[in-house]
Image (cartoon, rainbow, N blue to C red):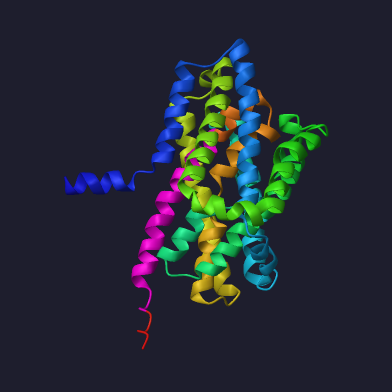
Amino acid sequence: MGPVRRVVARVDWFVVSLLLAVVVASFFPVRGQAAEGLEVAVVVAVGWLFFLYGVRLPTKEAVDALRDWRLHGSVLAVTFIVFPLLGLAVQLVPSSVVPHDLKLGLLFLTLLPSTVQSSIAFTSIARGNVAGAVVAASFSNLAGVVLTPLLVAGLLGGAVGFAVDSIGTIGLQLLAPFVAGQLLRRWIAPWVLAHKRLTTLTDRGSVLLVVYSAFSHGVVDGIWTTVDVGSVVAVVVLCCVVLAVVLTFTSVLGKKLGFSRADRVVLLMCGSKKSLASGVPMATVLLPAASVGIMVLPLMIFHQIQLIVCAVIARRMGDAAEPEPART
């Protein structure tokens, strides 16, 4: 039972739940009036998610980011410049290898902010600058609320039919709840932090609802007629290549800039992540409903790959780090 328990403990049950949501949507998609009701529920869920993001992100940490501008600026540059350039490079892959919509999905994932929880956790495991990781990851998500929609409009706009009218929707569904969370956090944050398990369940449940809705819509529109096993394998390979390039780049960049080991860990762990929790709800607002399902598929694949790879790297870096001197 020992090995079995260890395997079970390492399973990312959130990812398993997301895959189950895709399976359920594939066999039991919603249609008609039920689909209209689900769309309303998704709008509420997305608003709730970004309200919670606003409550959870300490404004002071974003302001503090300006003090160590070299580190946090480097993380932002990798997240919102290097990654998008790689996403554009992926578009050169022939559509006979990867369908057009999946290539656009790969580009979309490169436009997203970094993760928060996993970036901080892996930085801690690798014995890096945890405080720096908290600020870098938080600042990335704060910037992503504005930068990701701008990048989607600029790089994906023509391909997915991004309209100027979408700006109002973005403001109502993403920015307004986020700002409200920031304004109310001094009163609400203590309760949210005290009931972390409850809020985690509700925001993860919201993401599951959004994934189910996206794939349900996609199934009705014939998503699985355009995606085959070969295409999925090609996406997995491309995700691995993109992650490998970013990990190598951040590792070299940290040394070139003369960062301490602890700060190099921050750049490596925060700069190489893309947020599934932010990406899925953003996709429902920024992308056409008919293409959301297929375009978030690469993000779901990349999310799992980055967790596995970075967990191994973080563990090895932590084991190789010099032990901290004992306190007297």
Quarter of the picture containing the N terminus is: top left
Which is more toward the observer, 172 or 166?
172
Residue extent of the magenta highlight: 297-323
In-image side of 23 versus 203 (left or right) = left
In-image side of 57 versus 17 (left or right) = right
- Exactly how many numbered labels are in the figure? 0
User: Which of the 4 image quarters holds residue 175?
Assistant: top right
- Residue pushed farthest right? 164
Q: Is residue 292 above or below residue 216?
A: below
Task: Say whether residue 307 is magenta.
Answer: yes
Which is more toward the observer, 28 or 152?
28
**Visible in this render: residue 12?**
yes
Q: Is residue 164 above or below residue 31?
A: below
Residue visible at 40% across and 50% down in the picture? 308
Which is more toward the observer, 110 or 65?
65
Q: Residue 100: x percent and y percent?
A: 62, 30
Q: Main secondary structure of the magenta part?
A: helix
Residue visible at 72% across and 52% down in the picture? 183
